[in-house]
Amino acid sequence: MVKKEYICNKGKRSTIVIEDLTTEIKEGATFVIGFAGIGLIGPIVANTLIEQLSDVKEIGFVTSEYLPPISVFYAGVLKHPFRLLYSPQNNLIIGICEVPFQIPTAYNDLSKTLCNWALSEDVKAKEIVIFQGIPQRGIIDEYPVYYAAEEAMIEHLEKFGIAKVEKGIIVGPEATVLNEALTNRLDAYALFTPVLEIPTPEGAASILEVLNKIYDLKIDTTSLIEQGKEIKAKMLELAQKAQQYQQQQLPGTGKEYTGYFQ
């Protein structure tokens, strides 16, 4: 199989390998990247796009010396943990990274490689989008979406009724990708939503609804909302069990009654 590798002079420890050289990426593409951050917002959003965009094709993958020793597989088929896909109809590049990198210094190297490829003659992408969860405790009832963007993109994003975050910080690989984009021709922005410290599909659903508006997609988020309700119900059940467990401690003996869990 003929492949093409992209190695950035600045990001020498990461490489983008394009296996599908028959699929031409149209100029002006949007590069959506889902990293494995808190709430797993990025991978959930990316996976849903991959599942529902009918023309999406896997075109390659990202390798790095900093990737952890983790493999992923679906239906018994091994997959690269950081894959690149493309939807010609929507001119949308999707990057999905399902594992966290081993050390924070890896992110700078990675972001340079990603942006270098996105700006290459073979791609000529226009903008890059990342997602990040805002950690919350307890049960979340609403999942509003906020943005932070380069100044040139603010007017465009506000047309879709998204509120901006007035002040804050972005951390992890998402931050290094945005910082690198600030130094080059890519337009960059981030979308935020509240998340728990566990997978938060309802938050991903809210972000996908925003992407539907911006890019005229037709992604169905019903199943994600249902998954979120199931997770919430399980959390409530566990909390109730914990409370009952505490109430059923045997007073004065120092022993705990555990029959409730049998």
Image: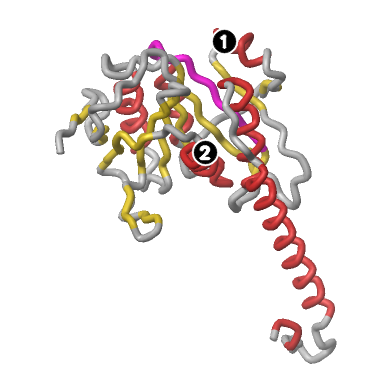
Q: CA distance from mark 1 to mark 2?
A: 31 Å
Q: Nearer the viewer, residue 10 or 55?
A: 55
Closer to the observer: label 1 or label 2? 2
In this rendering, the answer to whether 225 lies above or below 216 is below
- Callout 2 crowding tier (Cα within 10 Å): few <14, some 14–19, many ≥20: few
Question: What range is drawn magenta here?
Answer: 182-193
Mark 2 sits on what residue?
Answer: 52
Q: Nearer the viewer, residue 157 or 135?
A: 157
Tell whether position 191 is magenta.
yes
In this rendering, the answer to whether 259 lies above or below 246 is below
Q: Residue furthest front?
A: 54
Seen at 39% across and 58% down, the residue is: 75
Mark 1 sits on what residue?
Answer: 151
Seen at 55% across and 8% down, the residue is: 152
Tell me which colouring the rendered structure shows: secondary structure
Q: In the rendered view, does 135 fall on the left or right side of 150?
A: right
Query: In the rendered view of the protein, which quadrant contains the C terminus?
Result: bottom right
Relative image position of residue 222 (x, y in whole percent): 67, 44
Res 2 → quadrant: top left
Q: Residue furthest bottom?
A: 253
First of labels 1, 2 by sequence position: 2
